[in-house]
Image (spheres, rainbow, N blue to C red):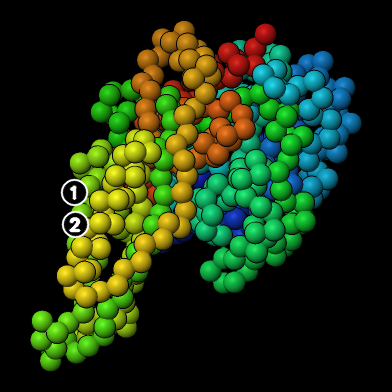
Amino acid sequence: MRFAELWETLLPLGRDAVTGGYRRYSFTPADLACREWFASAAAQRGMRASTDRNGNLWAWWDAPGDLGGQAAGPGSASAGPGARLGGPGAGFGGVGAGFGGVGGAVVTGSHLDSVPDGGAFDGPLGVVSAFAAIDRLRAQGFTPARPVAVAAFCEEEGGRFGLACLGSRLLTGAVQPAAARELRDGDGVTLAEAMAGAGLDPDGLGADEELLASVGAVVELHIEQGSALDGLGAAVGIAEGIWPHGRWRLDFTGRADHAGTTRLADRRDPMLPFAAAVLEARQAASAHGALATFGKVTAEPGAANAISSAVSAWLDARAPDQSALDRTVGQIESAARRAADVQGVEVGVRRESFTPPVEFDPALRARLAAALAAQGMQAPVLPTGAGHDAGVLAARLPAGMLFVRNRTGVSHSPAEHAEPADCEAGVAALAAVLAELAGR
Ligand SMILES: [Zn+2]
């Protein structure tokens, strides 16, 4: 099946009629529709579909001669509804023995969930391209020497439970299952409750060593979340690594007072050091080749005619390396403290989350580049400031990524866009990569 044909079948699911953006939050009806779509895409291709213990979806193209061990597995009932949203038991029977390490399965795919009013491509492009690449390989008569799997990782965006890459973090043991079960959405529903409501068993959450041992390499295809490829005139790129990134919370505490009667000299206004921090964020990021953003701020009591008593702000900072990130954040923190001192304001800075730098496997990256070069595709190597499941999985497995040109350069918005010809180029690139990695 051509990419465009399969793409059209997924496009309407979870799209908001008013904004045109997607609201595919984990375990909501929109997400369950996407999961049904995945199961049916697998069934149409005769691929064995299963849901692992962490809610991630898998579709397996087994290698000939490898069927003996796998056919008996409980996950082999690909078309049955029980296999779609089965509990942990529906996972990985039979896979693994003899296929771990470098000889293990080649996994591709991405995620199907979205941020609030996200675009159509972030995540789904990688899943649809994976199925389309398999169709392409089959049409070419290719037979894999090791299993090829399409995966759709659960809650990648953290759009419902607030923790990005939750499915891959649980799979690799980067998040403790007990803590994950207690994560709550905006309505107070826990992950455990939401999973149970979708027919999954939250008691099964946690690292899946058997599954990890069955995988030899991971290649995630993703729309570029920027416009570097467009600037370079290339349809497809290869990821070099993921910048270290984190989130810091800054709390400024001053004194509430009347905006019309308090002399300037008598004020302890927390908004002023906050403003200094915002301006410094731009300066520091520019000086260190980093990115620093205050995207969320709250003011107490929040009255238009009162000096604030407290301002809380969240800094998102990302940089090419740890030292640039440390210097960027350090400079912003110093500026905030200096300005707070001048204004008689207290300031507290707390790191809320942090993801260390990821360098994708250099040997795998070289194989991706060679496979694309053999097809006459020149794929530039790009760093990225965005987190991805492949980055989480890179801690345990050889992992790599392909990026597809984004004509608008916009991401996490309905404006993100990949041209049909670029999507086809992405499928061709992924097919070449899968043939290289899963071939004889
Ligand atoms: Zn994504």
User: Which residue is farthest bottom?
Assistant: 261
User: Looking at the picture, does residue 25 appear above or below residue 243?
Assistant: below
Residue 154 in view, yes or no: no
The residue located at (77%, 34%) in the rendering is 210
Q: Which is more toward the observer, 183 or 322?
A: 322
Where residue 426 appears, x then y in whole percent?
46, 25
Callout 1: few (<14), some (14-19), or many (20+) C-alpha neighbours within 10 Å?
Answer: some
User: Looking at the picture, does residue 243 appear above or below residue 117?
Assistant: above
On the image, which quarter does residue 241 sit in?
top left
Q: Would residue 421 be found to the left or right of residue 105 on screen? A: left
Give the distance between the C-alpha atoms of the residues marked 2 and 1, in whole angstroms. 7 Å
Q: Mark 1 and mark 2 in contact (Cβ < 8 Å)?
A: yes
Q: Quadrant of the C terminus?
A: top right
On the image, numbered disc 1 is attached to which residue?
A: 283
- Residue type at mark 1 is Gln
- Residue type at mark 2 is Leu
Task: Determine which of the numbered discs, if any, sits on residue 50 in the image.
Answer: none
The residue located at (63%, 36%) in the rendering is 151
Look at the numbered disc 2 and give the secondary structure of its residue: helix
On the image, numbered disc 2 is attached to which residue?
A: 279
Where residue 298 appears, x then y in whole percent?
34, 72
Where residue 65 appears, x then y in whole percent?
82, 15
